[in-house]
Image: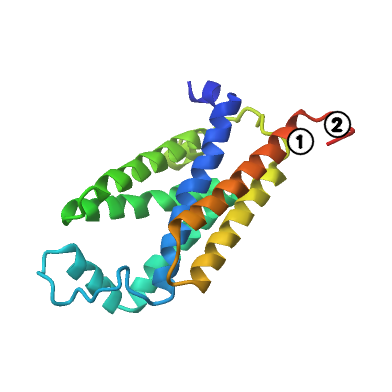
Amino acid sequence: MLLRLRQWLLMQLFIVYLRYLIGGAFVFASLIKLKGHRFTTADGSALPLHSAGHFFETLYQSGLYWQFLGMGQLVAGLLLMTQRYARMGALAFLPIIANIFVITLSYDFGLTPVITGLMLLASLLLVWWEWPVLRVLVNQAPRSLPPSRLGAAAVWELTGLALFLFTFGYRALYDQYNVLLWMGVCLLVGLLGLAVGLRRRVAPAGLA
């Protein structure tokens, strides 16, 4: 069934943009840690021990470990967004988001477990999508994949690079950010990449 799904154009597009989405979310969240800032502006050291605020304050006060978490998120997100190295990104993303999901279940995060749970399901989907090749990890012979119907891979790779550079630059330069602005620009870049990618896919060979 998976090999048949991999031949569907809409499914291939869905996977590409799912990588952009959750990879971009990780890159967006990673910069606050790499810059050595708190996840929230409030000092959580005075909060009850078993509270989300106190937990994040402990991570923040660790210094190097806090930045290490950010670097892990940055690398996993970047690998996914490149498309070329998305298989590695899916493997790196899964344990990180699984850990985050369990954390949000362990403390009072309101509805946040819904979001992290959906990201975990998305990560599992991406690993499953790559399973014909990744099955070698459990001593099974890899299977050949059907050719992509998306046309030139460079379009999707460049779109991912543009999304990464904008997200990284925006969060690196601004501590006070506008989520709607970030999402709006990313949406426009994604739509532009989609338009160019589909046009190149259907254009005659001499006009591509």
Q: Position of residue 140 (x, y in %)?
A: 47, 34
Residue at the spot 61% in from the left edge and 42% down from the top edge: 191
Q: At numbered mark 1, what does the secondary structure look like: helix, strand or loop?
A: helix
Seen from the viewer's position, the closer of residues 43 and 177 is 177
In this picture, residue 47 sits left or right of residue 68: left
Looking at the image, which residue is at 53% across and 66% down? 170
**Residue beneath label 2, please?**
205
Task: Quadrant for residue 48, please give it.
Answer: bottom left
Quarter in which the C terminus is drawn: top right
Crowding near the residue tagged with mark 2, few <14, some 14–19, many ≥20 C-alpha atoms within 10 Å: few
> Can residue 84 be spotted in the picture?
no
- Which quadrant holds residue 12? top right
Rounded to the nearest angstrom, the CA distance separating label 2 from label 1 is 9 Å
Residue at screen point 34% across, 72% down: 66
Using the image as rendered, state which of residue 189 and residue 60 is in the foreground: 189
Judged from this view, the residue extending furthest toward the right is 206
| Kind of element beneath mark 2 | loop
Q: Amino acid at mark 2?
A: Ala
Q: Nearer the viewer, residue 167 or 72?
A: 167
Query: Residue 173 has which mark?
Result: none
Residue tagged 1: 200
> Which amino acid lies under the numbered mark 1 shown in the image of this protein?
Arg
Residue 122 is situated, as x and y percent measured from the top left of the image, at 40, 40
Task: Report whether 84 appears left or right of 200.
Answer: left
Residue 163 vs 14, above or below: the answer is below
Task: Residue 69 in the image: state x and y as whole percent.
Answer: 37, 66
Residue at 54 percent across and 41 percent down: it is 17
